[in-house]
Image (tube, rainbow, N blue to C red):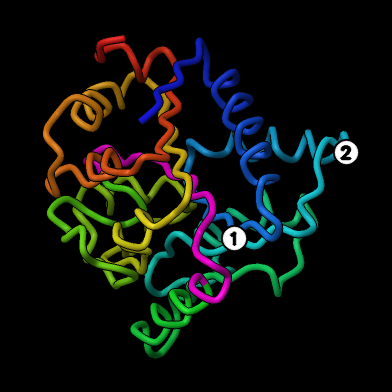
Amino acid sequence: MKIIISNSYEDMSKQSASDLIETMQSFDKPLLCPASGSTPVGLYKELVNLYRQQKFDPSNWLFVALDEWVGMDGNKEGSCKQSLDEQLFKPLKIDADKICFFDGKAADLDEECDRVEQFIQQHGGIDVSVLGLGMNGHVGMNEPYTPSSLRSHVAKLDPVTQEVGQKYFKERQHLSEGITLGLATLLESKHIFLSVNGKRKAEIVKKVIEGNITEEVPASILRRHKGLKIYLDAEAAEMIQH
C-alpha cells in the first residue's frame, strides 16, 4: 500500500491522472475500470485536458463498468454510464465497442454479471481499477458486510448509499439495488487507485487505512492488494498518521 497525500483536490487529481497514464502505458491493450461518483471527476477532467494537449493516446484502452443503479442504463441522466459518457468516454473519443458496461435495466441481471465477468477474463483481467470511497466504507456498490469472496453481483443498497446517491439526480429516485463488480474481482486488478477527498471522509479514511481489515469496512479489504495506491487530499488525510 502506498499513500499519496496532496495539498488540494486539484493537486490530487493531477497526480493520480499522471500516475494512471504512466501505468496504463505499460500495457499493450490496458483494461481500465473507472468509478463514477464525485471524487474521480477531477481525475477525468485532468485526463481530458492532457488528451487534448496530445500528452497521451487512449486509442488502445479498454473500459469495464464498476457499477450501475438497478433500473437504469446510459440513457438515464445521473446513471453511472451517463456520467462516465459525459466526463470520460465522449471527451476521449472512446468507441462503444471498447466499453463494457452493466445494463441495470437488463431482464436477467445475473446474466449481466456473467457477461461483464467474461469481458474481463477475455481481456486478461483489469489492469487498473479507479475507485472512490463511500461514507460507510463501500467501494463500488459493495456495502458493509458484503462477502469479500463475491464477484459481480446484485447488491442491496445501504440506506446511507440510497440517500447519498440522490445527489446525482435532479429528481428523487428509488435506489434500492445496484449491480457491481465484487471485491474478489477488484482484488484481481493489477493496480488499484483509491481516491478520497474532503474533510467529511477523514473518519472513514482512518478506518480504512488504520483500522482492522474487515468486511464491515469493505475498502479496508483493499489493503490486501500489493498494488494499492491511496490518493488523499489534505482534508481527507487529517486523521491518519503520516
124 drawn magenta:
yes
Image coords of residue 191 (percent x, y): 47, 45
Give left or right: position of 124 versus 138: right
| Residue at point 58%, 70% (across, down) | 123
Q: Is residue 213 left or right of residue 114?
A: left
The residue indicated by pointer 1 is 82
Residue drawn at x 54%, y 70% as measured from the top left = 101
User: Which quadrant, please, contains the C terminus?
Assistant: top left
Q: CA distance from mark 1 to mark 2?
A: 25 Å
Q: Which residue matches tag 2?
A: 54
The residue under the point 87% across, 34% down is 53
Q: Earlier in the sequence, mark 1 or mark 2?
A: 2
Question: Looking at the rendered structure, which numbered label has been put on residue 33?
Answer: none
Q: Residue at x 28, y 48 (%)?
A: 163
Q: Position of residue 147 (x, y in %)?
A: 16, 61
Tell me the quarter of the image containing the N terminus. Answer: top left
What residue span does the magenta drawing correspond to? 120-137
Q: Residues within 10 Å of mark 1 (few under 14, many from 20)?
A: some
